Structures are given as C-alpha cells and as structure tokens.
Image (tube, grey):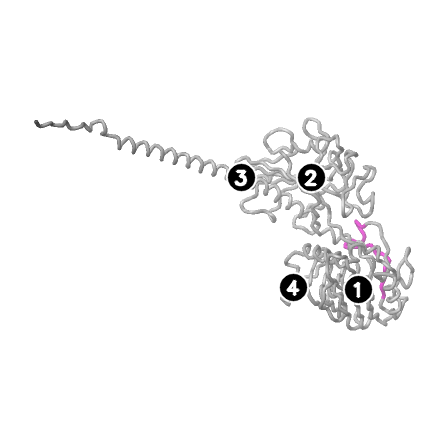
Amino acid sequence: MNNIRGKKSKASEQGIALIVALMVLLLLSAALMGMIMMSNTETSVSANFRDEQTAFFGSKAGIEEVRDRMRSGATNSLTSSLPATALPGGANGVLYVTNPASGETDTPWLPLGTNYPDTEICQEVTCTGGVPVGGWYITPAATASTSYAASPILPWKWVRVMAKANKSVTGTTLVTSVDGTTNGNRVCWTGTNEVAVANTYASCAAANGNYLPVYELTALAVTPSGSRRMTQYEVSRTSFPPIPGAMVFDGPNPVYGAPNSNAFNVSGADANQGPNGGAGCGAAANQPALGGYNNAAVTSLNGQLNRPGSYTSSTPYTATPAVSNVSTALGPLSTVDGLTNLVSSITAAAGASNVFPNANSSVPTNLGTNSAPVINVVQGDYSLSGSGTGILMVTGTLTMSGTPSFNGLILIIGEGNVVKNGGGNGTLDGSLLVANLYSDTPPTYTHLIPLGANNPPGIPTINWNGGGNATIQYDSCWTSSLTQSFPYTIVAQRELIY
C-alpha cells in the first residue's frame, strides 16, 4: 500500500519579509529622527551659548572702550565729561556712553520702555519711580567712538560711568561694599586697596593727596536675538610712584661726574607749571635737587659735587647743597621688583608704536610737544639732542649732546647710565631718575639682579662732561599731568544678573 503524504501549505509565511523590513525601517527612521532632534538640540544649545557669549564679550568690549577713553591722551577722550567729584544719585553724577544700532533709540536713563533702560542703577543708588531724583545724569550723553568700532558693530548698548559709592551690609547690593558699615560714602584707591572716606571731602585728593577716585563702569549688551549680559568693572587711575627729586640716583654707591660750569644748576624747588602754566596743578611739593638712595649715597654725592651752590631747593629741604636721602619717598622704586613693574607699566602705556627695540636699531621720531606729549620707550642705547615732551624711558645708556630740552620725565632704568657731552645749553623741566638693574660694576652690564627678593638696584651713573647753561628744574605738575594718559587700572570686575 502506498501512503501519500500531503504537502504543507506555505501560505501562512507569505509577506513576513516585508513586515520585518518595515519594522527595521521604522526602527532606523526612529533612530534617525532621534539623531536629527539631538543634532538640532545641540545646534540650538550651541547657538544660544554663542549668542550669550557674544553678549558677554560685547559688554566687556564696551567697558574696555570707555576705560581706554578715560585717558587724557586717548582718541575721543572722555576726560572732560567724567563725573570727577559728583557722587551717583547727585546732580551730574552719572555719565552714559551709548552705542545704538542703526535706527535704534538708546535711552538708558528712562525707567520704562524698550530702549534699554538701566534698571540696575536703582541697585546702586536710591531711586524714586525707577530712577534717581533730579538731574542725576550728564547731558548730552557721550556716544561710542568710531575709532574703536568693530565690524560688524558690537552689540553693547550703553556703558554707565560713575564714581563708586560704598554700600553697607543692609543695602540691596553687596558687591560694592568696602567696609560693610558706611553707606553712600565716596570710595578711593590708595594704590593697594579701596577705602571709604567721608562725603565732607569734595574729592579723594582732598581726603588724602595720594588717594585716587574709583569709578564703576557698568555695561549692557543685547544681541539681535535677545541675549542680554551685563558686566561691571571698578577702575582707578594708574598710580605713578613719585619721583622725589630733580635728579634721583636710585641705587647705592652712585657715580656722579659733576660738571664744573657755574652756569649749570639743578633746582628741587617745585616749579609746578606743567603743560598749562600751572592751571589744573595740585599744591606744589618741593623736592631735593639730588635724591640719594640712602645716607651713604648722600655722603658720596656730596663728595662728588664740584660746585655745591648749583644744587638748590626750598623748605623743607636744605637750600644748598640740596642733597637728601629719599629712600622712604622712593617706595616701590627702591627695589628691582618695583622698578621692573614700572618699566612694564610705562611700556604698556607707550603702546607698540612707541616702543623701540634695540635689535631693530629704531629710534623715536616724535618726542612729543606740550600740547601732545608722547611716551617713548627705547630698549637699548639712545642719543638725545633735540626737544620733546612726555615720558622718555631708556633701558640702555642715554647720551645727551648739543642743546637737549625736555618737559616731563626722563627715566633711565636698565643700565642706569647717563652721559652728557659738550657744554651746550639745555633744560629739563620735570625730573630725571637713573636706576641700574645689573649687579656688575659699570660700565659692565651682564648680570641682571634677580627678581622676587626685593633686591636693591645696582650702581647708577651720571657723567656730565661740560655744563654749559644746562638747567634741571623739578616740576611735579608735569608728572601728574603725564600719568593721566596711562590706562585706568582694573580694581575689580564682575558679571551682574540682569
């Protein structure tokens, strides 16, 4: 008997491959959509972060422009517009510098509206109706300078400039508190820290001749997509160490080849004239004709004078020969560390175009005028025979010949060596400081004195071959006026929640 087996039907398996393919496609599509969403999210996060950073750095750019324009020698300087003595909340106590985009209205002094109102001001001073009372801001407002503008224009909208007033611990904002107790008092910079002084003083200088005002610079930036950031700096004018004498030998064991000419004279009696014939100068402060590093240096200098009567001064110094120990007055300039810091500060203030490396064999072509002083830094030897105004710093040997004339400061910091040739005429109204940063005995300059231990400088040298009618006249007003061209120092910086 034959058994015939029936064939199994495959109809139930038909289409399974299609279903599997569709399921795999669905999974792949879901994974792809997830990846696209994650990519879009990352793109959005990155774009938002970039926009926030654009606003943040935009606000800092606004502050940096204003900080630089606070210098007297800056392009479009704001010096004449600064609230020099007025406190915030008082009449003309706030200066705004605005930077609206094309077609925008930028009025931060108005409390309402969409024109970038300064709502932070009421965290700093007492307000009524969203603004301080009275004519509290300076009109007209200053505007951004095209000399500083980037392309495209950066999105900072305004920078507020005002003197810093102290806040007590009970105030709504603690970031400006100096001592945590006084409220609304003027804040000044001592050169190392902030102090609050009574408002009975009209200025920081009135409280203490060495105090400088502290300004708060607050900037708001808003990008076209709406990101907003606000930053704030506290700044003060760069303090310049006093030069305590008409000629200062900043170092022990000075070498002075003094001239024999009776027409040569050095006076420490403060002329206090400066660039404007005395206008805007502080009180005169006499100094010695020759400043010595210590008592031993004074003794050495007195022994090297050919005509002691040529070195004069006035009270509180000896009339003649006016040679005094200025060690306490030198302050940071009594050490190699302090002198090196001064060199760095002046080099930064001069700017790249006025720094002349010895390796390039380049020399200054513009020594400045009374109306436009210049800071020049020569990193090497330099010969001076013409006239100029400003600050001249030489790190090598300064050789003077002919009839050199200079108004301001001549700083020979490095080799600390000055040579005057011939008997020609010449004048210096201001001060001359000579400091040697090498441990060798001149004229060898090989081993720099190490930093970090507040070591004293080396042997300063001045050799005056022939006197002529040369005159060196101390003038404190030149010093104070020139240092106003230095960039303001950042005392503190913060970001504000806006």
Question: What percent of the width, then of the height, locates residue 217?
Answer: 68, 41
Picture quarter with the N terminus: top left
Q: Residues within 10 Å of mark 1 (few under 14, many from 20)?
A: some
The residue beneath circle 3 is: 49
Q: Which mark is residue 447?
A: none
Q: From the image, give the main secondary structure of the stretch colored magenta.
A: loop
For image coordinates 59% across by 31% down, the residue present is: 114
Q: From the viewer's perspective, is residue 122 above or below residue 293?
A: above
The residue beneath circle 1 is: 427
Helix, strand or loop at mark 2:
strand
Of the image marks 3 and 2, the number of the one nearer the N terminus = 3
The residue closer to the viewer here, 362 or 105, is 362
The residue beneath circle 2 is: 95
The residue closer to the viewer here, 215 or 1, is 1
* Mark 1 or mark 3, whichever is nearer to me: 3
Picture quarter with the C terminus: top right
Residue 409 position by quadrant: bottom right
The residue beneath circle 4 is: 357
Q: Give the CA separation, mark 1 to mark 3.
A: 60 Å
Q: Amino acid at mark 4?
A: Pro
Q: Residues within 10 Å of mark 2 (few under 14, many from 20)?
A: many
Q: Give the CA separation, mark 3 to mark 2.
A: 31 Å
Of the image marks 1 and 4, the number of the one nearer the N terminus = 4
